[in-house]
Amino acid sequence: MADIRIEYSDKTKGSLFLFWLRRVLKMFTFMGLLVCPIVNYYTGGKAWSVIADVSMIFFWIEFLSPDILENNAMRQVFRIGTFAIILNTLIGLLLSPGWLGFVLPIIGFSILIISVILFLSNLERHRNCIMPLLLETLMALIGFLVANAVEETLNWPIITLGALSLTIAVLGLIVFHNDIWTELKKRLHIK
C-alpha cells in the first residue's frame, strides 16, 4: 500500500492567531447581537438596535465567516452595496425618515458605475462573473420602475439610476448576450 501524503500546509503562528482572533470576534459579535436589543428595550427610544444588529450580521458574514466560492471583486461590490442600501433604508425608516428617495438612488447608481468599471477593467477574467452585474442592473431597473409608479415627480438621482441601468441593460444585452446566456444556462440548469 502506498503512503498517504498530506497536502495541507503547516500551521503557522499567523494562521493560528487569525483562527483564534476570529473565534474571539465571533463570541463578542454574538454577545453584541444579544445585548443591543436588550439595552434598546430598557433605555427606550428609537430602534437603533436593529441597525446595530444588521451591521454585526454583515460583519459576521463578510469578515468572520466569508464565502469562499465565487468571492471576487464584483461579488464584493454587490454585497457591500446591498448592505449599504439595506442599512441606509433601515436608518431612514427607523431613525430619520425623509431622505431615502434621494440617497438610495445615489448609492444605487454609484454601485452600478463601480461594478461596470470593475467588469470592464479585466474583461476576460470577469466574463464569467457577469451575474452580479446583471442582478444589480435588474434591481436598479425595478427600483426605478417602482419609484416611477409611486412618485409623481422624479428627482435627478432616480432619473440617473433609471437611465444608467437601462443603458447598461441594453448595451449589455447587445454586446454580452452570449456570456449572459451562458451564465443563465449555468445558473438555471435542471438536472
Image (cartoon, rainbow, N blue to C red):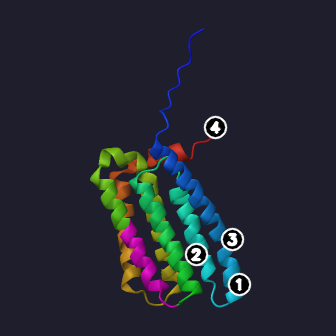
At 50% from the left edge and 87% from the top edge, which residue is drawn?
Answer: 151
- Which is more N-terminal, label 1 or label 2? 1
**In the image, is residue 99 part of the stretch drawn in magenta?**
yes
Report which residue position mark 4 lands on: 191
Q: CA distance from mark 3 to mark 4?
A: 42 Å
Near-viewer residue (90 or 31): 31
Query: Is residue 117 in view from this perspective?
Result: yes
Report which residue position mark 1 lands on: 41
At 50% from the left edge and 78% from the top edge, which residue is drawn?
Answer: 88
Span shown in magenta:
98-111
Q: CA distance from mark 2 to mark 1?
A: 13 Å
Q: Are marks 4 and 1 in contact (CB under 8 Å)?
A: no
Query: Is residue 166 in view from this perspective?
Result: no
Q: CA distance from mark 2 to mark 3?
A: 11 Å
- Which is more N-terminal, label 4 or label 2? 2
Residue 138 image offset from top left, x and y in percent: 47, 64
Report which residue position mark 2 lands on: 52
